[in-house]
Image (spheres, rainbow, N blue to C red):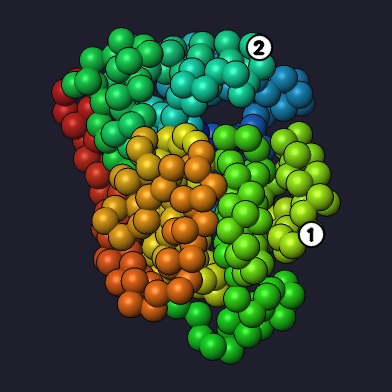
């Protein structure tokens, strides 16, 4: 089987969509050596992703004009390349397919991560929202099969686009193998020194934006008189100004900010944390929840939506709008050793079912089913 994969995010996006693409590409190439995978991207970035699998090769624009006008290449160049190279099935890993997709000659699958731009439209400017909707609607209409990374996302696709539920397969996002490996005491000590981490801390991982709800977590720490410092890993947006203003006014809350860290160091950040708190208002899945559970770290996250799909029976669920409830949950987890132990053990067992090799096997079955139904 010759599979084309949209690898743009794998090479160019460090966070969620990029992680999904890198993890899935790596797992597919490793677990299915008999298949050939062609990775399509406008450019590469060896510092972020450097695939070295014998059954994978990268396809980028050939000419200066294609590189300069890369969106034209994605819409017109990729479809021509798919036909020329005899690709059996093409997988759009992040919401989209080329607008001139040759559906009569190549089968297709698209992964839809979320429809937050439709569920929470006020968080997006009108131009971006219209563009995202156009791309995503087209992909859902054109694809032979849709992979939704959560039941929540599948339901949103049906609600907003009128897609038949029978066209959608829910395959949860997998967790990178590195999160299941415990660091040695020496490795943890080295990581703590490298990043000047506190001896004990609460961890937050996610973009500093309104939807992720960091400000309410800070209010919970302040009003709840919780003295544990908070470690924040995430890129700042305009919303961060509100966060920094709050911290200037309330110097009892101590926060260490990290705009970005090496991917290889992230599991250690989870493992050193007392608790991971993820009070997001809405997600397509919430991969940091799974990363924390695989790292054997207790998780506090939001009620409703997809959060229980990622967190399973081990997480504590709170109303993300209620700062008092968030504070109570943090005090429980950090103060009750038996509860921590139960959450850690149950959480790791839940996360083990999201191993990337299992996810890759499910995705490959989708490819085979689509081709067999030709």
Residue 251: assigned label: 1
Q: Residue furthest bottom?
A: 186
Residue 173 rendering spot, x and y as whole percentages: 37, 46
Whether the residues at callouts 1 and 2 have beta carbons within 8 Å, the answer is no
Q: Between residues 88 and 198, which one lies in front from this camera angle?
A: 198
Q: Residue at x 30, y 72 (%)?
A: 342
For label 2, the residue is: 127
Residue 89 rendering spot, x and y as whole percentages: 34, 29
Q: Quadrant of the N terminus?
A: top left
Q: Which of the 4 image quarters holds residue 225?
A: bottom right
Give the mark count: 2
178 to the left or right of 122: left
> Badge 2, how many Cα within 10 Å: few under 14, some, many 20+?
few
Decide which of tag 1 and tag 2 comes sooner along the chain: 2
Callout 1 secondary element: loop
115 to the left or right of 127: left
Q: Residue at x 44, y 59 (%)?
A: 329
Disc 1 from disc 2: Cα separation = 39 Å
Q: Residue furthest left?
A: 373
Q: Quadrant of the C terminus?
A: top left
Q: Residue at x 58, y 81 (%)?
A: 188
> Badge 1, how many Cα within 10 Å: few under 14, some, many 20+?
few
Callout 2 secondary element: helix
Q: Residue at x 66, y 16 (%)?
A: 125
- Is residue 149 visible in the rendered image? The answer is no
Residue 124 rendering spot, x and y as whole percentages: 62, 21
Q: Residue furthest right?
A: 248
Residue 29 rendering spot, x and y as whole percentages: 39, 52
């Amino acid at each position: 089987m010759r599979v084309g994969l949209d690898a743009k995010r794998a090479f160019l996006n460090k966070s969620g969509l990029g992680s999904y693409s890198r993890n899935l590409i790596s797992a597919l190439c490793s677990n299915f050596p008999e298949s050939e995978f062609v990775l399509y991207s406008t450019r590469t970035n060896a510092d972020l992703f450097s695939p070295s699998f014998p059954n994978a090769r990268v396809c980028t624009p050939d000419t200066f004009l294609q590189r300069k006008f890369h969106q034209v290449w994605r819409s017109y160049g990729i479809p021509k390349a798919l036909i020329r190279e005899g690709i059996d099935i093409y997988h759009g890993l992040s919401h989209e397919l080329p607008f001139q997709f040759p559906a009569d000659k190549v089968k297709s699958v698209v992964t839809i991560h979320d429809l937050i731009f439709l569920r929470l439209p006020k968080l997006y400017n009108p131009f971006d929202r219209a563009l995202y909707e156009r791309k995503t609607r087209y992909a859902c209409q054109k694809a032979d099969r849709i992979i939704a990374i959560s039941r929540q996302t599948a339901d949103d696709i049906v609600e907003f686009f009128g897609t038949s539920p029978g066209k959608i397969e829910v395959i949860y996002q997998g967790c990178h193998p590195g999160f299941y490996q415990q660091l040695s005491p020496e490795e943890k000590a080295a990581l703590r020194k490298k990043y000047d981490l506190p001896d004990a801390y609460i961890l937050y991982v996610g973009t500093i934006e309104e939807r992720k709800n960091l400000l309410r977590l800070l209010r919970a720490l302040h009003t709840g008189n919780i003295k544990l410092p908070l470690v924040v890993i995430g890129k700042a947006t305009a919303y961060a100004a509100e966060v920094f203003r709050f911290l200037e006014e309330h110097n009892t809350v101590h926060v260490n900010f990290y705009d970005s860290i090496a991917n290889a160091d992230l599991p250690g950040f989870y493992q050193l944390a007392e608790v991971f708190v993820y009070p997001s208002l809405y997600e397509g899945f919430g991969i940091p929840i799974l990363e924390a559970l695989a790292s054997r770290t207790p998780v506090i996250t939001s009620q409703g939506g997809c959060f229980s799909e990622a967190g399973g029976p081990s997480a504590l669920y709170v109303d993300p709008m209620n700062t008092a409830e968030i504070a109570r949950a943090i005090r429980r987890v950090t103060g009750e050793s038996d509860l921590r132990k139960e959450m850690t053990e149950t959480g790791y067992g839940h996360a083990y079912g999201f191993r990337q090799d299992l996810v890759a096997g499910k995705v490959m079955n989708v490819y085979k089913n689509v081709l067999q139904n030709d």
